[in-house]
Amino acid sequence: AERAVRALAEVVQYAAWRRGIAEPGKVPEYDTIDEAGAGALIRRALAEGVADPRGVRLGDDDAVELLGRYGISVRPTLPAPGPDAAATAAARLGYPVALKTTAPHLRHRADLGGVRLDLGDEAQLRLAYGELTDALGTPAELLPVVQSMAPRGVDTVVRAAIDPAAGAVLSFGLAGAASELLGDLAHRLVPATDRDAAEQIRSIRAAPLLFGWRGSTPVDTPALEELLLRVSRLVDDHPEIVSVDLEPVVVATHGLSVLGAGVRLAPPPARDDFGPRRLPSY
């Protein structure tokens, strides 16, 4: 029954659009975008990168800089190759902090104990560092980092990637099992409009968690919509960007925090007609 209802809803929306009732939405402009600076960074990275059919993965600093050119801030992270370095990093960032492993097999795997949160002082940090290395491996294997704590909220994931058939696709879901195990992700074609972004975050099955499910405090969905639109604009402006992965994005009551970011580049495809196909309204 749900599939039939969804199909009818699409028919109703399409009919409203044809009659000019539904607002088509628009791609917003932002004064804080530095398109030229981002383009220069991308060209330099591609020129310096090692040839790889999968493209060039930006280093953490370059990824943060590129995203920053489009008004997307990533919470600072400092390497912690030893307990003394971790303490120095935490003092620089300010307590409380989080201690995380960044090894590929442990990335985003809080369930394996690779993330320790709310460390309020140096003693707690050193204790957590020892527990982490005793349980999971040496610092060289774990690649630990220290990051300042973000306000509590709902963990989400924002991605963009090139689909061979459809072009650039913007994806959104809740971080963890909701998206990885259940595939609860919503997708929109790039460039996304403000209406696309608003509908996207409301279309996943777990969306009630963002809007005060069972008495919880609703999170800042306008900030989340803006993040989606800025990622969409970044990918649309620069066809060399073949993937963007922001995970987790912690959406709090006021504002959000991007805690992890990855960007991959490749020479632009030969085709230049990717994008949403829109039927004309008569």
Image (tube, rainbow, N blue to C red):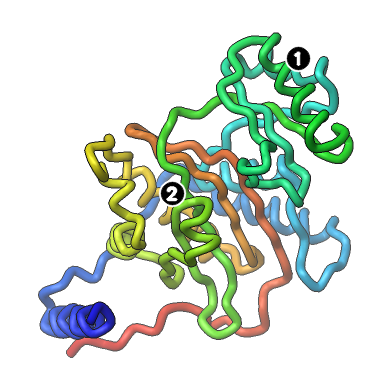
Q: Residues within 10 Å of mark 1 (few under 14, many from 20)?
A: some
Image quarter for residue 220? top left
Q: Is residue 269 left or right of residue 259?
A: right
Name the residue that disc number 1 marks.
88
Q: Position of residue 178 (x, y in %)?
A: 46, 57
Specify the amino acid type for callout 1: Thr
Residue 27 visible in the snapshot: no
Quadrant (top left/top right/bottom left/bottom right) for the N terminus: bottom left
Which label sits in the foreground, 2 or 1? Answer: 1
Which badge, 2 or 1, comes first in the chain's sequence? 1
Q: Residue at x 69, y 37 (%)?
A: 114
Specify the amino acid type for callout 2: Leu
Q: Where is 238 relative to 209, above or below?
A: below
Q: Where is 9 relative to 108, above or below?
A: below
Which one is nearer the viewer's eye here, 21 or 7?
7
Q: Which mark is residue 8?
A: none
Q: Where is 220 relative to 43, above or below?
A: above
Q: Give the secondary structure at mark 2.
A: helix
Residue 101 visible in the snapshot: yes
Name the residue that disc number 2 marks.
227
Give the residue at the far bottom of this rendering.
Answer: 282
Q: Position of residue 203 (x, y in %)?
A: 32, 64
Q: Residue at x 53, y 62 (%)?
A: 181
Q: Position of residue 24 (x, y in %)?
A: 24, 71
Q: Where is 173 relative to 150, above or below?
A: below
Q: Residues within 10 Å of mark 2 (few under 14, many from 20)?
A: many
